[in-house]
Amino acid sequence: MLTIPGRPVRTCEGWSRRELLRVGGAGLLGLNLPEFLSWKANAAAGKVESPGKAFGGAKSVVMLFLQGGPSHIDIWDPKPNAPSNIRGEFKAIPTRVDGIQVSETMPMLAEQMDKVTLIRSMSYTPVGLFNHTAAMYQMMTGYPPDKVSPSGQLEPPSPRDFPHMGAWISKFKPMDGPMLPFVEMPRPLQESNVIGKGGTAGFLGKAYDPYRLYQDPNKELKLDDLSLRADVSPERLKDRFALLKGINGSMAELEKTVSSYALTEYYEKAYDLVLSGKARDAFDLTKEPDKIRERYGRTTFGQGALLCRRLIEAGTRFVQLNWNSVANGDPETTAWDTHAANFGPLKNLHCPVLDRSLSAFIEDMDQRGLFKDTLLVVTGEFGRSPRLGVSTSGNVNSPDGRDHWPYCYTALIAGAGIKRGVMYGKSDDQGSSPVDSPVHPTDLVATIYYALGINPAMEVLNDLKQPRELVKGDPLLKMFG
C-alpha cells in the first residue's frame, strides 16, 4: 500500500518546487516562479578533452530505483551450483542471450535481456554506509554523506547536502521548452523517519529540486498543480503576468541582481509552463490504451513506469521512479528489505510486479525508438547477503532472510549507446564479491553524466565554496558500443 507523507507548504528554507507550480494567486505566481526557473541562466557543463562517440548521446535519463536492497541472487544473478543455503529456493532460467541466466521469478525480463547490459559487479566497501539512507545518499549524489551514525542513519535533508544528480543535470542541461526538468515519483526515498535524504538539490537551491508527484499513479491523478484554477482564465492570467512584470521591473534590488532580459525570460518560461499543458498531459494516463496499461501492470510501480515513458516523450530530462515501499518496510507488503522473509514475498509480491513493469518498459522504449537517446538505469542501494540467516549489518534475520550486502550486487542499464545483450563484470560462485570489472556506485553516476555530455570530473563548488569533483567516479566507457 502506498503511504504518502504530508505535503510541505512553506518552510524556513522557502517555497518548495511543488508550491511554486500552484497558480492563480498573483503574489505566488509573480514573485516566485522567476526564482523557480532561474537555473536557465547557469553556465553549461564542462567538456571532456577527448570525448568518445557515446559522450552526450543521451538527452534524458530514467532511473528505476529499487529502494530497500533487492536480492541479486534471487533476481538476476542466480547461483544454481552453490550450496542450498546460498542459492535459495529459486531455479535459474535461460534468457534470450546465451550464457546469461536469471531467476525463475523474472520470466518476462528474460525475454528482454537482448536489449540491456546487466552489471553483476556492483560493489563498495561500507564505511558507515551499511544501512539504507547513507547508501541511497551515495547512489543519488555520487558522494558519501558527511555525517553517519554507527547504524548508518542520517539527519533529515539539509540545504548543505550534496545535490542529487538530477539537480545537476537540470542545471547543466536546461530545458528547451516548457516542461518539468526533474521528476521524482511516487514519493521520496525513505528509511524510518528520514525522508528524501539525497533526493534534493541541496546547496544548489530549491529551484533545482525535483517535482514530486506524491500520488499513486495506479489511481486517478489529481493534476491541479499543473492546471489553472477554474476561476482564472488564460486571459486573466496573462493580464496578471504583464502586471507583475511591471511591478517587479521597478524593484531596485531585483534589478541589481537580475538583468531585465533574464527576468523577462523567466516570466515567459513560467507562463508557458502553466499554459502549455504539456506537463499536465504527460501525467494523464487516461490517454494510454488499456492494452498498454495492462502490459505495464495495474500497480503503483507499473503505472509509474508508464508515466516515466510519457514524461521522457514530453521532454523531461531526469525521471526517477522509486519502489513505492520504504526501505525498511514490511516485506509482506512489497518492501525489498527481506530480513524476516525472503522467498515468499519475492515469489508472490515483489518479483511479479518488477518483472512485468520492467520488461514492459524496456520493450516499449525499444519499440518506440526512445532508447536512441534515453538512458535507463535500474538499481538499488545494495544487494542481499549470499548466505541465508546470517547477520552482516547488525540486523536480526530469519533462517530464510537475507541481510544487507554492498560488497556485490546487480544493476541493469540500457539505451543511449549502451551495448545490448551483454553481461558486464562477474561475481564469484557465491555472489559475494566481483571477480571481474568491479563497479562502484560513483562509477555508475559518472557514466550517467558522461552519457549526457557532462564531464564527471569537472570542478564544482560545495556549500562552503570549496572546489570538488562533480563525482569521484570513472565513466564505464566499455559499456558503450
Image (cartoon, rainbow, N blue to C red):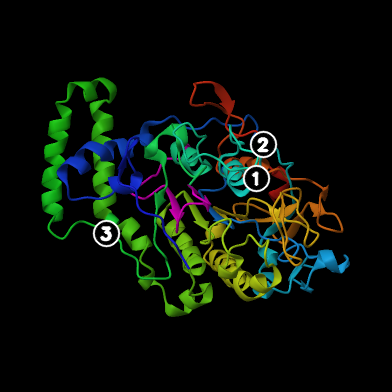
* Residue annotated with mark 3: 224
From what the image shows, is residue 153 above or below residue 352?
above
Percent position (x, y) of residue 137? 57, 42
User: Taking 449 as reference, is 49 above or below it?
Assistant: above
User: Which tag is nearer the camera, tag 2 or tag 3?
Assistant: 3
Q: Secondary structure at mark 1?
A: helix
Which numbered circle lies on residue 444? 1
Q: Residue at x 44, y 41 (%)?
A: 170
Front disc: 3 or 1: 3
What is the magenta range?
172-194
Q: Is residue 174 magenta?
A: yes
Residue 454 visible at all? yes
Mark sitting earlier along the chain (3/1): 3
Q: Does residue 315 appear left or right of residue 370 in this picture? A: left
For badge 1, the amino acid type reads: Leu
**Vertical arrangement, residue 335 with respect to residue 271, above or below:** below
Label 3 CA crowd tier, 10 Å (few <14, some 14–19, many 20+): few
Using the numbered discs, state the Cα–Cα distance from disc 3 to disc 1 in whole angstroms. 36 Å
Residue 305 sits inside the magenta stretch: no
